[in-house]
Amino acid sequence: HASAAFLSPFDNCGVLVIDGVGERESITIWKKEKNRLEKLYNVNFPHSIGLLYSVFTAFLGFEVNEGEYKVMGLAAYGEPIYKEKIYKLINKIEPLELNMKYF
């Protein structure tokens, strides 16, 4: 995140990092002012959009950390018929909290 922020032509900007797992954090939001970064928000593992995506990848029979791009490509052709079932995997959206009994 720092490399993107400090190479940005903007003195002030926001930085959003969403990852499966970082060191501990899976989502962070930063504010950059001049040459300073300030963390505004974070979500810690195991509550991770990347983990949720990996579960769907495995469920569909693709290899985790290898087949996610296939799921992303197929997503554009689908219909949201399983939306309610997917919502059961998530306890809360803000902050992100996965229902761990499914993982």
Image (cartoon, rainbow, N blue to C red):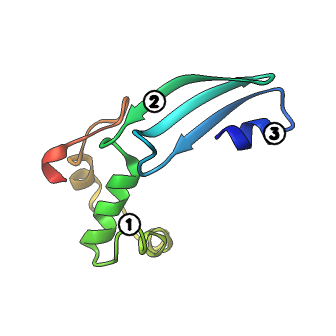
Packing grade of label 2 (10 A; few <14, some 14-19, many >=20) is some
In the image, is residue 16 above or below residue 71? Answer: above
Q: Nearer the viewer, mark 1 or mark 2?
A: 2
Nearest the eye: 6 or 68:
6
Give the mark count.
Answer: 3
Please tell me whether mark 3 sits on a helix, a strand or a loop.
loop
Please tell me whether mark 1 sits on a helix, a strand or a loop.
loop
Left-right relation of 11 to 4: right
Most extreme residue toward the left is 101
Please, what is the three-letter code of the amino acid marked with disc 1? Glu
Packing grade of label 3 (10 A; few <14, some 14-19, many >=20) is few
In the picture of the structure, the residue carrying the numbered disc 2 is: 42
- Picture disc at residue 8: 3
In the picture of the structure, the residue carrying the numbered disc 1 is: 79
Packing grade of label 1 (10 A; few <14, some 14-19, many >=20) is few
Residue at 35%, 36% (x, y): give it.
96
Nearest the eye: 100 or 87:
100
Please tell me whether mark 2 sits on a helix, a strand or a loop.
strand
Q: Which of marks 3 and 2 is nearer the N terminus?
A: 3
Q: Quadrant of the N terminus?
A: top right
In the image, is residue 68 above or below residue 102? Answer: below
Left-right relation of 36 to 97: right
